[in-house]
Amino acid sequence: MGMIELAGLTKRYGEKMAVNQLTFAVRPGIVTGFLGPNGAGKSTTMRMMLGLDRPTAGDVRIDGQHYDRLKDPLKYIGALLDAKAMHGGRSAFNHLLCLAQSNGIPRKRVHEVLDTVGLTAVARKKAKGFSLGMGQRLGIAGALLGDPRILMFDEPVNGLDPEGIHWIRNLMKSLARQGRTVFVSSHLMSEMALTADHLVVIGQGRLLANTSMADFIRDNSRSYVRIRTPQRELLLDELHRAGITVVEAGGGALEVDGQRPEAIGELAARHRIVLHELSPQQASLEEAFMQLTAGSVEYHAHADTPPADPPLGAAPPPAPGAGRAPQWGADWKKG
Ligand SMILES: Nc1ncnc2c1ncn2[C@@H]1O[C@H](COP(=O)(O)OP(=O)(O)OP(=O)(O)O)[C@@H](O)[C@H]1O
């Protein structure tokens, strides 16, 4: 129960392939993150999943059925797409009551969801006066109203303060723990890393990755040691003699995988080699995501920057070869 299956899902707007042959499944009991840069096609995919947009080709099935064939769709899927659409002249309570009444949901459920999202105290206030965070909570209350097996959230943390973000994260996790299917989109890897158990990545409408979060982290959180020394040749010789593989990392720095900084420092000391830097480093997941989607970002901040370059301030790109684990997603990069 609560399985979503996309098969060859495609949406074309004129010449633009907004969604291109997406095939993947979203399973119950976990949070599945739907990650992609702006314009990747996340919202379009979600709208098709909810039967709000008609696919050009392919289809989406929910427990084997098309959305428009579902009986009581609100009890099957709850979605938060565009929170701003919720704001209106009605009170939060009346907004939810209308939604409940037109879907055969009992009035007491309105009180329950208002309580869940923490809006009970302002339930009689007009929703158009709500802050972004309150509007988001009201949208989520609407999604929860039918007590659905499946929940879908499109960029739910956008524009929220840290407390609101924390609250939404915990809510999604607890919904998944209850056995529900939770599908949430974001353009931030860091956000997904904190929330999602499984990761589906798209770029320019195409599937770039479909992997567990644990595998993604394991494959991408490479740790290494960065070294700077004025006695570069000497150190390279000694590392080589000790059977330690070293990579030139640009800017005069050297990088070593699979060694503790202590070992390198002691080796240098034994040979009286001066070190100017000896620092443990951790490759960021954000970096891995940017590499994965580099070929598919629509608008680059600097058109003259080669797409595979990390932004200023990011760690330098890994040097080719040198016994390093292959960068995750390298195969997916588009030419
Ligand atoms: N109704 C439409 N008509 C024409 N093009 C559209 C339409 N809707 C979306 N697109 C285009 O399809 C592509 C995917 O858009 P979509 O909104 O699904 O991306 P997204 O991943 O949700 O991005 P964002 O995070 O910026 O919302 C974009 O290039 C967008 O301009």
Image (cartoon, rainbow, N blue to C red):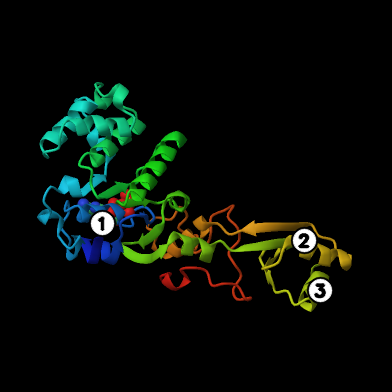
Q: Earlier in the sequence, mark 2 or mark 3?
A: 3
**Callout 3: CB less than 8 Å from ligand 1:** no
Q: Is residue 25 above or below residue 80?
A: below
Residue type at numbered disc 1: Thr
- The residue type indicated by label 3 comes to Glu
User: In 3D space, how far apart are the residues under numbered discs 1 and 3 (Cα atoms)?
Assistant: 55 Å
Q: Nearer the viewer, mark 1 or mark 2?
A: 2
**Residue located 42% across and 62% down the image:** 212
Along the line of sight, the residue nearer the viewer: 301 or 62? 62
Report whether 146 appears left or right of 242. left
**Residue 264 in the image, given as x and y percentages of width and height:** 77, 65
Residue to which mark 2 is pinned? 262
Amino acid bearing label 2: Glu
**Would you say 228 lies left or right of 158 here?**
right
Disc 2, SS: helix
Q: Residue 113, how many percent across, how many down?
A: 27, 34
User: As displayed, is residue 171 above or below residue 23?
Assistant: above
Name the residue tied to disc 3: 238
Task: In this rendered view, identify the residue nearer to me: 43 or 66.
Answer: 66
**Image x and y of residue 237, in percent:** 80, 75
Residue 45, which numbered label?
1
Q: Residues within 10 Å of mark 1 (few under 14, many from 20)?
A: many
User: Residue at point 46% right, 49% down?
Assistant: 194
Residue 236, position as x, y percentages in the image: 78, 72
Residue count near mark 2 (Cα–Cα under 10 Å), binned few <14, some 14–19, many ≥20: few
